Image (cartoon, rainbow, N blue to C red):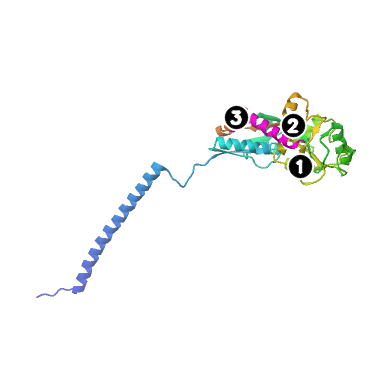
Amino acid sequence: MKLSRYPVWLSFYSIFCMVFKKTLLVSLSFTLTFSAAQSSVDIDIEALFGNSTEQQPKKVVVVQGTGDSESILRIIASHFNQKYPEITVLVPDGIGSLGGVRSLLNGGADLARTARSFTLESRGGGREIFMVDVPLVFVIHRSVKGVDNLSQEQILQIYSGGISNWTELGGPNAKIYPVTRQAGASSFIALKSSIDKFGEGHTVSKIFYSTTDVEQAVADHDYTIGYLPLSAVVNSNLKVLSLNGVAPTLEALQSGDYPHKITFYLTAKKSPKEHVKTFVDFATSEEAKALYADLLENKLTNIVE
């Protein structure tokens, strides 16, 4: 009998390799088929129900600019956000009217909030929308008792140093600390237009460069006096004064009996996006006007004694 050239163990090894190879191929094919089926199922589920871990981003409206209308616009934005949950309106801290216009034109904001009118044709154009006229008021710290009304002449005397103690006005025996804004501020410009010679010549007042700083300075320091848009004292405990015997109500402002006012505008690009237009329409609507009146008149009821 002729013997094989290969050992018996080698033959068994060859058979084992063939069986292992087939088993491996079957296992790999099953794994790939299962993975493909699983991916298909995942895709079908997402197509039917969407991805539950990802939310559609909200549309955002950034309204940047003056601090004068900051408080009242935040309240308006809160009402708007409840009514239109798919849109979020943001009202950042004030950077001034001009800063808001620059931010709008540079693409950093969707709307500029301003407290005076701007000509935008030379800056690339824009659309200025009237919002509301607000009384410009004089406010004092609660430490000043017995003073509820001032005349324009007394205002001029206080800011020039002619009247320096509250006793001269029926108040406590304490020095008067006047607070003012810089010459280019919207409230300073508005006040100067209604009080002749205001801010001219020698002044004894401390200058602040934002509405918020003025409000905080008067709120934090005894025997101080300053001026602000009525809207800026909505959330404060400051006392608002009458001028020349007239309280700064919206009715007195509209009739002309109270002459000191500041005008708020929203400024948009010539072709704003639809969600921006939606907020502009709301902020200038009859609903918003009723909110303005309610906020300002209720505030006066609480702070004018």
Q: Quadrant of the C terminus?
A: top right
Secondary structure type for disc 3: helix
Q: How far apart are marks 1 and 2 (CA)?
A: 16 Å
Q: Which stretch appears magenta?
A: 279-305
What's the magenta bit mostly, secondary-structure-wise?
helix
Tell me if residue 242 can be seen. yes
Q: How crowded is mark 3: few (under 14 residues within 10 Å), some or many (20 or more)?
A: few
**Mark 3 highlights which residue?**
281
* Label 3 with label 2: CB-CB less than 8 Å: no
Q: Name the residue under label 1.
A: 214
Q: Residues within 10 Å of mark 2 (few under 14, many from 20)?
A: many
Amino acid on which the number 1 mark rests in the picture: Val
Q: Which mark is residue 73?
A: none
Taking 29 as reference, is 153 above or below it? above
Q: Distance between the residues labelled 1 and 3?
A: 31 Å
Query: Looking at the rendering, in which quadrant would you find the N terminus?
Result: bottom left
User: Where does the image place residue 174, in percent across and percent down from the top left?
Assistant: 87, 44
Which is more foreground, mark 1 or mark 2? 2
Residue behind mark 2 = 135
Q: Which of marks 1 and 2 is nearer the N terminus?
A: 2
Q: Residue at x 75, y 24 (%)?
A: 255
Q: Which sits earlier in the primary sequence, circle 1 or circle 3?
A: 1
Residue 292 lies in the magenta stretch = yes
What kind of residue is marked 2? Pro
Q: Is residue 243 above or below residue 31?
A: above
Cα distance between the residues tagged 3 and 2 = 23 Å
Q: What element carries label 1?
A: helix
**Front position in the image: 28 or 212:** 212
In the image shown, does 65 or 221 lie closer to the viewer? 221
Q: In this view, does 165 lie to the left or right of 248?
A: right
* Quadrant hosting residue 105: top right
